[in-house]
């Protein structure tokens, strides 16, 4: 106090309660973040998303197109630095009763958020406006639906396939135009492609659990099912899934898992990606990798083919993707729905996916965007109608982590695949109850 | 409380008169002025008091209640008694996370004390350029945890990391470090030891506090360096070691950022890096089981409390304060 003169003290002591009042005011302010600024009958709705770069441009293009078409609704796109897997901002906003009108949302989490009553039910809106599942790939619609109610509008998607390096195939005396179709062929090719020096790999043919080699990718390819819709139970111990994990574990033993881990931990990313440097001949990857391959190594001579299956037919894959949702408690659900509907329509899909070079959830849009003529993209488009989606259950995240742990434990020899998957099943089903 | 303190100061000028010459108080209205001072003090402290109450005490108390419910952040849930606690006992991952956390604490805390004291003693030598050395050892504590994690992922890279590079040079084949189940936790302990600069600074202050008279007297008696270290330095450093022990135990049990960043929250390989607070976070924010997470938080709180009480209780036997 000594160094402050009388009037300064007054100023400071005035400033602090003022700041406090402002801070507290901000907390208790009932005016929602999506408060309507009804100027001349225009309703402004807030849209939270987390895209940056080209992804943000694509979103803005959709928003602009929508705003141009609607004189009475204005969408205000706000970038919130959220991680798609940890959307704590949205969580806090919904819990605090102060959510945006529309939010970008990972479809994977529709089950858990819908179960918590955090999403607006879109079923009636969709019925009224004639938005039906027939427009979309089955998995996309299903992943947006929880207990027969629609909670999200799918906007993009992906798929997993086997990527293989054609040059490496030639080098190992394999036919680059005839990639492995069965698990046996895959193993044979992997063996031929692998060059091991002591405990280090100069080139490794294949690592089943690398990149997108999740148990979901293998379990479905082996013909297993992870969820029994009728009983509402998880079936992670399906004999076919157990079989797929047994195969992965055998593979880990054969090539020594610690040596493989040494290899994967040393592998770089970006232009040092082992698939680009030729150190890894085959892997299970997603379509989103294509753009970075083009960027870092445009002359990479590679092909894609469906994930091999034990029988060499019934190929499948699984897909996820983003959606737009109306959080529970959104101030303008009706106007928000107009935007959600537009994003999910062919027009919105074409703008977004065309700009971002992502796969649409509508087959005709993918055709319009020319994906069906592209030698690589067409492979993905062809598998989409048969693609799976992860079970839409409140415990989706738990199931994901448990499956991932089971694979990790199994390939490291901590327990047999059957025991581990039975334990997963027990734990997740207990959580469902 | 404020009133009492004010009165005390008012009526007992002796407390201020100890070091200064007692002077007659010349204020005309001493009572109102001191009262105002007290009010101003509370007033200025009010943002922090309100903050403490709203963001610490209230959630703390609320979490006791939540630990008995199925609260999920988005839904209030139901009162379910001790259900959460009962479930925890049978949760294998919970037990594994306890094992990992205790393993880390048991090795990290003593190691950090031994290396911290040793480092502080070295940095207390009277040689040229000591401030530079001290700065070097303090610098790592300024690096954010996430950056440390990324940095060490490269250093411990089994293929081309510097650590295995050095080991290779002297003919040792290094392990896969973070990729190996046995070595993941030791790697983490190793990485954490890198950031003990903060503790070293406190040890240095403690060393500076030890009066030279003891050493002079010991030298007259012909004590060796060894004897001086173990009979003067270390016993008189125990109050500081005591402080760092308590803080170290608390910190070790709350280990989160490093393993979470290193494993993208997965605790890989094979859950060997799933720590207690990581699992708590997953339950609270990923699985919408905030009640369950609250129960975990309270178990952790009680465990840390008991350990701290034990350390305090034992401190009577091994902590020596100067001048006593």
Image (cartoon, helix red, strand yellow):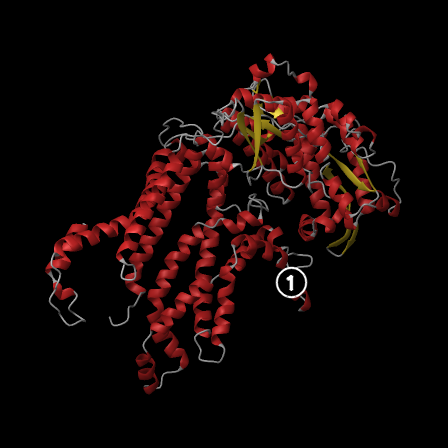
The C terminus of chain B is located in which quarter?
Answer: bottom left
Residue in the picture at 73% in, 26% down: A384
Q: Position of residue A139 (x, y in %)?
A: 67, 24
Q: Position of residue A417 (x, y in %)?
A: 63, 36
Residue in the picture at 47% in, 62% down: B196
Q: Give the quadrant of residue A406.
A: top right
Give the answer, above or below, for where A149 lies relative to A395: above
Image mark 1: chain = B
Residue in the picture at 63% in, 28% down: A390
Q: Nearer the viewer, residue A294 or B99?
A: A294
Q: Give the quadrant of residue A343.
A: top right
Residue in the picture at 43% in, 27% down: B75
Can see residue B27?
A: yes
Q: Which residue is under mark 1?
A: B162
In this picture, residue A268 sits left or right of residue A409: right
Q: Give the quadrant of residue B298.
A: top left
Can see residue A360?
A: no
Q: Position of residue A275 (x, y in %)?
A: 76, 46
In this picture, residue B79 sits left or right of residue B93: left
Give the answer, above or below, for where A336 lies relative to A306: above
Q: Nearer the viewer, residue A333 or A245?
A: A333
Instruction: State the SS at label 1.
Output: helix
Q: Nearer the viewer, residue A273 or A252?
A: A273
């Amino acid at each position: 106090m000594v160094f402050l003169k009388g009037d300064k003290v007054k100023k400071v002591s005035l400033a602090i309660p003022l700041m406090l009042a402002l801070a507290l005011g901000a907390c208790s302010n009932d005016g929602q973040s999506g408060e309507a600024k009804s100027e001349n009958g225009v309703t402004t709705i807030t849209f939270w998303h987390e895209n940056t770069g080209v992804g943000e441009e694509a979103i803005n293009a959709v928003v602009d197109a929508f705003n141009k078409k609607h004189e009475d609704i204005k969408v205000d796109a706000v970038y919130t630095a959220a991680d798609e897997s940890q959307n704590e901002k949205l969580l806090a906003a919904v819990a605090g009763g102060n959510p945006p009108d529309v939010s970008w949302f990972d479809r994977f989490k529709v089950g858990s958020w819908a179960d918590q009553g955090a999403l607006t039910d879109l079923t009636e809106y969709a019925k009224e406006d004639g938005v039906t599942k027939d427009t979309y790939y089955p998995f996309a619609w299903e992943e947006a639906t929880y207990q027969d109610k629609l909670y999200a509008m799918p906007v993009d998607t992906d798929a997993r396939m086997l990527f293989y390096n054609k040059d490496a195939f030639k080098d190992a005396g394999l036919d680059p135009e005839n990639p492995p179709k069965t698990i046996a062929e895959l193993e044979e090719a992997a063996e031929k492609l692998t060059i091991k020096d002591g405990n280090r790999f100069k080139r490794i043919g294949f690592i089943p659990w690398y990149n997108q080699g999740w148990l979901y990718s293998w379990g479905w390819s082996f013909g297993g099912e992870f969820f029994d819709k009728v009983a509402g139970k998880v079936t992670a111990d399906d004999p076919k899934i157990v079989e797929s994990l047994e195969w992965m574990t055998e593979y880990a033993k054969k090539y020594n898992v610690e040596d493989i881990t040494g290899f994967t931990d040393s592998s770089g990313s970006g232009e040092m990606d082992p698939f680009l440097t030729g150190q890894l001949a085959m892997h299970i990857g997603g379509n989103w990798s294509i753009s970075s391959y083009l960027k870092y190594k445009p002359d990479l001579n590679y092909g894609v083919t469906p994930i091999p299956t034990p029988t060499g037919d019934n190929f499948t894959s699984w897909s996820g993707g983003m959606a737009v949702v109306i959080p529970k408690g959104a101030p303008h659900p009706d106007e928000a729905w107009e935007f959600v509907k537009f994003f999910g329509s062919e027009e919105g899909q074409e703008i977004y996916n065309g700009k971002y070079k992502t796969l649409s959830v509508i087959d005709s849009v993918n055709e319009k965007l020319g994906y069906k003529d592209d030698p690589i993209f067409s492979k993905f488009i062809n598998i989409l109608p048969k693609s799976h989606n992860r079970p839409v259950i409140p415990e989706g995240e738990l199931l994901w982590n448990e499956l991932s742990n089971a694979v990790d434990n199994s390939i490291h020899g901590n327990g047999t695949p059957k025991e581990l998957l039975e334990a997963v099943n027990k734990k997740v089903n207990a959580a469902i109850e | 409380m404020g009133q009492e303190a004010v009165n005390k100061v008012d009526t007992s000028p002796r407390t201020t008169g100890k070091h200064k010459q007692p002077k007659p108080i010349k204020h005309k209205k001493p009572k109102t002025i001191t009262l105002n001072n007290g009010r101003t003090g509370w007033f200025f402290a009010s943002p922090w008091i309100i903050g403490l109450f709203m963001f610490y005490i209230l959630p703390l108390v609320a979490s006791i209640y939540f630990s008995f419910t199925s609260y999920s952040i988005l839904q209030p849930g139901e009162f379910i008694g001790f259900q959460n606690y009962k479930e925890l006992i049978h949760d294998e991952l919970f037990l594994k996370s306890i094992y990992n956390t205790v393993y880390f604490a048991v090795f990290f805390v003593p190691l950090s004390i031994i290396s911290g004291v040793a480092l502080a003693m070295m940095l207390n030598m009277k040689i040229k350029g000591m401030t530079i050395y001290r700065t070097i050892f303090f610098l790592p504590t300024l690096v954010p945890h996430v950056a440390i994690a990324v940095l060490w992922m490269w250093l411990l890279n089994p293929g081309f990391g510097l650590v295995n590079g050095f080991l290779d040079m002297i003919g040792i084949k290094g392990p896969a470090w973070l990729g190996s189940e046995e070595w993941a936790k030791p790697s983490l302990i190793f990485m954490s030891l890198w950031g003990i600069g903060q503790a070293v600074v406190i040890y240095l202050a403690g060393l500076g506090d030890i009066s030279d008279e003891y050493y002079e007297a010991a030298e007259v008696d012909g004590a060796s360096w060894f004897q001086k270290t173990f009979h003067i330095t270390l016993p008189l450093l125990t109050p500081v070691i005591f402080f760092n022990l308590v803080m170290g135990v608390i910190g070790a049990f709350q280990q989160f950022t490093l393993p979470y960043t290193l494993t993208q929250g997965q605790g890989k390989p094979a859950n060997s890096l799933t720590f207690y607070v990581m699992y708590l976070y997953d339950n609270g924010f990923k699985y919408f089981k905030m009640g369950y997470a609250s129960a975990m938080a309270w178990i952790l709180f009680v465990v840390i409390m008991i350990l701290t009480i034990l350390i305090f209780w034992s401190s009577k036997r091994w902590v020596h304060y100067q001048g006593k």
